[in-house]
Image (tube, rainbow, N blue to C red):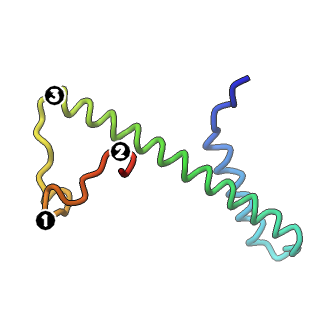
Amino acid sequence: MPDKPFEFEKALGELEEITTWFESNNVDLDQGLVKFERGMELASQLKTHLATVENRVEKIKQRFTSSAGATPSSPTDNNEADPSAGQTDLFGA
């Protein structure tokens, strides 16, 4: 059975609940440790999901930029002095 899709809004909501709990005056140390660990797990999952979405957006933009015959952005548009400096593929290699 395949994993269910990541529910970004649900994970973000849970992380916000944990944050609110920590901001309250009734914080138990042992319970806080468990919530902190869960919060770190959620933050990691959210970060990974956002990176995946960002990569998909970049691929889509490249596909439509290439098919439209548009010219690549100039080095000054990317704040790069050398056009070949910092060139990477979508996965940072």
Q: Residue at x 26, y 36 (%)?
A: 62
Rendered view: 51 above or below 28: above
Residue type highlighted by circle 1: Ala
Proximity of marks 2 and 3: CB atoms separated by less than 8 Å? no
Callout 2 crowding tier (Cα within 10 Å): few <14, some 14–19, many ≥20: few
What distance separates the C-alpha of mark 2 from that of mark 3? 20 Å
User: Quick check: 5 left or right of 71?
Assistant: right
Q: Position of residue 80 (x, y in %)?
A: 18, 62
Rendered view: 60 above or below 72: above
Q: Which residue is mark 3?
A: 68
Rendered view: 35 above or below 63: below
Residue 90 — which label? 2
| Residue nearest the observer in this picture, 4 or 8 | 4
Q: Quadrant of residue 17?
A: bottom right
Residue 81 — which label? 1
Proximity of marks 1 and 3: CB atoms separated by less than 8 Å? no
Residue type highlighted by circle 3: Ala
Q: Residue at x 83, y 63 (%)?
A: 34
Q: Position of residue 35 (x, y in %)?
A: 79, 63
